[in-house]
Amino acid sequence: MKRLFASLSLAAVLGMGAPACALADAQEQHDLYIDAMRSLSEGRQNDASEALTRMIQQEPQHAGAWLDLAIIQCELGHAAEAEQLFRTIETRFAPPPVIVEVINKLRTQGCKGWEPRVNMSVAIARGVDSNVNQGASNPNFTFGTGESQFTLELLPEYLPRSDHYTALSADYIRDLNANGTIGFLQARLQQNDTLSAYNTSSLAAGVEHPLRLGTWSARGTGVLAALGLGGRLYQRQAQLQMRLTPPLPLPSTLQFSMLGGLSRMEYATLTGYNSNTWELRGLLTYRTSETQAQASAGYLVDRGSTLRPGGDRTGWFNNLGVRTQLPYDFTGELAWTRQTWEAESFYSPGLIDVKRRQETQVLRGVLSYPLSPYQTVNFELRGVRNAENISLFQYNSRQIQVNWQWHNF
């Protein structure tokens, strides 16, 4: 319905009534109308209704605002208010036949009220991972400093071990109200054929709410998650994020946003590794009917306990990704991420007298094909390169995966 609102508004303005720019306060009315359309695009129907109500109070001859407000009231289930607005449009503006047809269709259907959208998807995957245990790339490791240095050869269980796996996932997203708030659940389970100690699972639940801060668009998100490893609880996470989009004079295909967030991580089986991570990131998004692309860069600050090896750390995060339509109904996706960390102190004084520096790069490619309107098969390649100045933690891995996905949208 969001696109319908904008289309009807344009048709109404062109075919019904005088343009608002004829008035002295045209800019304020224009801003109200734009704010209403943005609210609709973000799912904030109540906010859009309030903006349009203020607008028609200032400019009673803006037929497009009357029509959009009537449709919103009908969508929210306010039948009496919608009917009153429909009658005002018919008597005041003498609408053309196409608008009369829309009004009559809405009357026939009835104003059933707001109904939440529910999006669901499930997927099953089969794949192979060249390094399930994130085994070290270098089989030898040197301890100590100066004349006390000695080199050891790592045991086989600390070297890369490959395995095939089966993965199941499910996502559930639901509107919580008519003003754009959504709730979501995500579940993941990955079982290895032989290396069961590295089986993973996760469960996440969150809420997301859009809002306006003056002329800025904003979206706040809160998430709680639990991760399991080898059949036991491994980590608990809590995250808060706020995404701000300023009203920059960019082409319609581009959008720039800023994201700030705080994450709390607690480890169930490790002592001294709990941490709080602050993030500030900029995002540039490009979107057309066939292609979506995003680039981001951000600064990270990770504050841990005094017991954590290496102490606090800082880092950078970079991301590039593109998704586009390809010939013969295929869709292609390519993404690259890079994250760096640098510790403030030696990892283990007297044993590993090095400040840990980590650089992790992930390259991911996906080729998708729709089997039906609600089923998709995906072929995915993923490569991970974790480069560190402490060779014990260096690792590389490659994954190949095929999955089938069902979704109701």
Image (cartoon, rainbow, N blue to C red):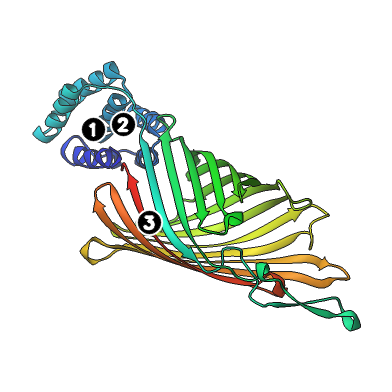
Foreground label between 2 and 3? 3
Q: Which residue is mark 2?
A: 59
Q: CA distance from mark 2 to mark 3?
A: 54 Å
- Residue 231: x percent and y percent? 60, 47
Q: Nearer the viewer, mark 1 or mark 2?
A: 1
Label 2 or label 3, whichever comes before in sequence order: 2
Q: Quadrant of the C terminus?
A: top left
Query: How far is mark 1 from mark 2, CA to CA?
Result: 9 Å
Query: Is residue 191 rendered to the left or right of residue 81?
Result: right
- Residue 242 vs residue 402, the one in the foreground: 402
The residue lying toward the viewer, choosing from 262 and 212, is 262
**According to the image, label 1 marks what residue?**
63
Residue bearing mark 3: 403
| Left or right: residue 278 compared with residue 4 | right
User: Do the CB atoms of the residues marked 3 and 1 lie less than 8 Å apart?
Assistant: no
Residue 106 higher or lower than 199, as above or below? above
Count of residue discs: 3
* Place of residue 325 in the rendered image (x, y in percent of width and height, measured from the top left): 28, 62
Left or right: 220, with 36 as reference point:
right
